[in-house]
Image (cartoon, helix red, strand yellow):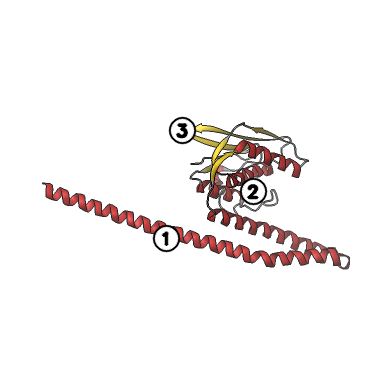
Amino acid sequence: MSGPSHTGEEDLRCRVQELEHRVAELTEALDASNRELQTFSYSVSHDLRAPLTIIDGFARALMEDCAEQLDSQGQDYLRRIRIASQRMGNLINGLLNLSRIAREPLCPDTANLSEMVRTIEMELRYLYPERNVLFTIEDGVTAQGDRRMLRAVMDNLLRNAWKFSVARDPAHITFGACAQEGKTVYFVKDDGAGFDMAFADRLFIPFQRMHQGKEFEGTGIGLATAHQIIRRHGGRIWAEAAPGAGATFYFTLN
């Protein structure tokens, strides 16, 4: 009786070890592929930045020095070149930032998210003094994580709420935290344009937009950046929304 049982246990142990070894190999291969992709993304983005800066610089010089020699159509073409090159520059900067976040080491610390939100609110009010936005900020909300990266998360989520509530007067943006299943859940809520939850799986994919570019400017990288940072902190991010009824973004940290 003991012989076959012992053999069965050994076989099972060997199978488990084989599976663990295979999982380790696949994990290492995936990590290597991700590192290669991040390096490629960084290299391409970095190499594209220089010629794009030259294009924008020459277009600006033509507008400043030769505008009087061009008819209205020629001036319009130059304006379009500048707008397109600047938009591409923003996309490249977003990609570089996304790549940098994936590679940089984390520096865990205690971060006061409430203070971060108040600072970002002041920055937004300074940049857009014409907007009428009411902020509700819960006091004393803190989190454990890399302060600089968490600042980027809050900046992206708040700018997202600010942008998509532009049609509201006044608009309302709320930041706070609550407990769910023993975990702290942080949230940013707005009463703006919202979106159809049927497309929620596209939210955190780079360059995916929930609205037409003519409606709301943006690169489509901000939420992907927030998602990357939160994943690196062992957390998750998700959203609830409805068209015309605003959106709430939730996230956790490990």
Label 2 residue SS: loop
The location of residue 3, given as percent across then percent down, is 12, 50
Looking at this view, name the residue that lies furthest to the right. 68
Task: Please rate how many residues cluster around mark 1, counting C-alpha atoms within 10 Å: few if below 14, some from 14 to 19, many from 20.
Answer: few
Amino acid at pointer 2? His
Q: CA distance from mark 2 to mark 3?
A: 35 Å
Residue 32 is left or right of residue 229, and the answer is left
Q: Residue at x 14, y 50 (%)?
A: 4
> Residue 241: which quarter of the image?
top right
Q: Residue at x 57, y 57 (%)?
A: 99
Frontmost residue, 167 versus 40: 40
- Residue at label 1? 29
Q: Residue at x 77, y 67 (%)?
A: 58
Between marks 2 and 3 in the image, the one whose residue lies nearer the viewer: 3
Label 3 residue SS: loop
Amino acid at pointer 3? Gly
The location of residue 170, given as percent across then percent down, is 73, 34
The location of residue 183, given as percent across then percent down, is 48, 35
Q: Which mark is residue 174?
A: none
Task: Please rate how many residues cluster around mark 3, counting C-alpha atoms within 10 Å: few if below 14, some from 14 to 19, many from 20.
Answer: few
- Residue at label 3? 182
Above or below residue 58? Residue 144 is: above
Label 1 residue SS: helix
**Marks 1 and 3, the one that precedes in the sequence:** 1
Amino acid at pointer 1? Ala
- Residue at label 2? 211
Residue 38 is left or right of residue 128, and the answer is left
The location of residue 82, given as percent across then percent down, is 75, 61
Frontmost residue, 39 versus 79: 39
Between marks 1 and 2 in the image, the one whose residue lies nearer the viewer: 1
Q: CA distance from mark 1 to mark 3?
A: 34 Å
